[in-house]
Amino acid sequence: MNEENYKVAALLAKNNADEEKAIQGYYELLEVMIDKNDKDTIREIISDEKNHAHLLTEMMLRYDANIVEAED
């Protein structure tokens, strides 16, 4: 594993954090939405953001030599 791969993994992690922050914002928005159609649209956006986060995590694991989460 070379240092360049870790740079890519770090950028992927940063973008993943951005996705998670967006998800948080959409949950907050969902709490104040009144219209059912608008709520459904926000839920769809949350679903898309979760998919993005999942894809970014998969890529990050490929670039960081599959450093896995520690088990408790």
Image (cartoon, rainbow, N blue to C red):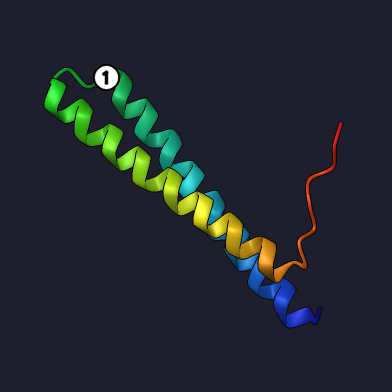
Q: Which residue is drawn at 74% across and 67% down?
A: 64
- Decide which of 43, 66 is in the foreground and name it: 66
Task: Tell me: residue 49, above or below residue 63.
Answer: above
Is 15 left, or right, of 34 in this rendering? right
| Total numbered labels placed on residues in the image | 1
Task: Tell me: residue 19, above or below residue 56.
Answer: above
Task: Tell me: residue 60, above or below residue 39.
Answer: below
Q: Badge 1 local density, few (<14 within 10 Å), some, or many (20+)?
A: few
Place of residue 50 in the rendered image (x, y in percent of width and height, measured from the top left): 44, 44
Q: Which residue is drawn at 30% across and 42% down?
A: 45
| Image quadrant in which the C terminus is located | top right
Place of residue 40 in the rendered image (x, y in percent of width and height, measured from the top left): 21, 29
User: Toward which corner of the image does residue 57 lie, by quadrant?
Assistant: bottom right
User: Toward which corner of the image does residue 8 lie, by quadrant?
Assistant: bottom right
User: Toward which corner of the image does residue 11 lie, by quadrant?
Assistant: bottom right
| Image quadrant in which the N terminus is located | bottom right
Is 55 left, or right, of 6 in this rendering? left
Q: Which residue is drawn at 76% across and 61% down?
A: 66
Element under disc 1: helix
Please give the residue where the numbered disc 1 appears in the rendered image: 32
Kind of residue at disc 1: Val
Q: Residue at x 15, y 21 (%)?
A: 36
